[in-house]
Image (cartoon, rainbow, N blue to C red):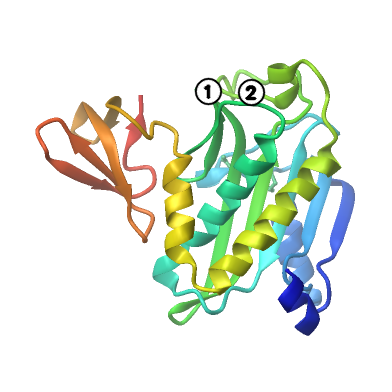
Amino acid sequence: MDNYQEKESAPRIIRLDEIGSTNGYLREHLRKEKLPEGSVVMAGFQTAGRGQQGNTWEAGPGKNLLFSVVLYPDCIPANRQFLISQIAALSVKEALERRTDGITVKWPNDIYWKDKKICGMLVENDLMGATLFRSIIGIGINVNQTAFTPHAPNAVSLVQITGKTHDREEILDAFLSRFYGYYLRLLQEKEEEIREAYRQVLYRKNGYHPYSDADGPFTARIRDIEPTGHLLLQLKSGEVRRYAFKEVIYR
Ligand code: BTN
């Protein structure tokens, strides 16, 4: 973030042992004090970790990397807010792939190792008029947790994959350096570069796979991700179906 560190102060990192949710803490903190762009809240444990769609997010004490980052992307139109999810997903993928093969991004912003979930994201965007005003990007990476509750049957961690523990701060550093770099590219309007990088790392990028929607199961291939974040699936008949998040299930 070299350029904009000159006009703003450097991002802060707030480390907490235990908190309800890093997304919630960051939002509350920002009501009292504006933090520099790119600032982070990380916690060793969350008592009320939040997942997508009102789900909870569970992680053992001191085991995983749980953090939230704030951006003020006021030049990004509301209908392009998916770019924030894309740069966050790319940055996690690149931070993890130094430690293991097999990392992909499952649309819209889960990070997978093979067919299992190693990281989830909760991106909360606040709009002002037609542009983004603030984005809180909450990320939970399964790092050193050796077992998961039956609520998360598809979860996997780095320690399970590699057989050794990993330094959470090193992973955070790797993430942040990439994330700030991608954000600068976004501010420099390199949107197509970001979209193409995202396409290249998609889970199920190639070939036909089973899905289901409100009308039932079907087989399709990923045709594209629209700038709005919609997923386009193409059936063997040539028919193309368009989905918002949660309108389609990967079977
Ligand atoms: C998902 O359901 O996949 C999203 C999970 C997001 C979890 C992270 S952990 C850090 C941040 N704080 C939260 O309360 N949630 C996110």
Q: CA distance from mark 2 to mark 1?
A: 10 Å
| Direction from residue 56 to residue 42 in the image, left or right | right
Q: Quadrant of residue 92?
A: top right
Disc 2 target residue: 156
Sequence-wise, the earlier of marks 2 and 1 is 1
Instruction: State if disc 1 and disc 2 touch (CB < 8 Å).
Output: yes
Q: Secondary structure at mark 2?
A: loop
Q: Quadrant of residue 55?
A: top right
Q: Residue placed at 54% from the left, 67% from the top? A: 186
Disc 1 target residue: 114
Please state the horizontal and vertical placement of residue 159, each as a whole percent of the image: 75, 21
Please state the horizontal and vertical placement of residue 85, each as a whole percent of the image: 53, 54
Closer to viewer: mark 2 or mark 1: 1
Which quadrant would the C terminus be assigned to in this image?
top left
Badge 2 amino acid: Val
Badge 1 amino acid: Lys
The local crowd at label 2, few if under 14, some if 14 to 19, many if 20 or more residues have their Cα within 10 Å, is: many
- Of 194 and 30, the residue lying toward us: 194
| Direction from residue 95 to residue 32 in the image, left or right | right
Q: Residue placed at 41% from the left, 46% from the top? A: 199
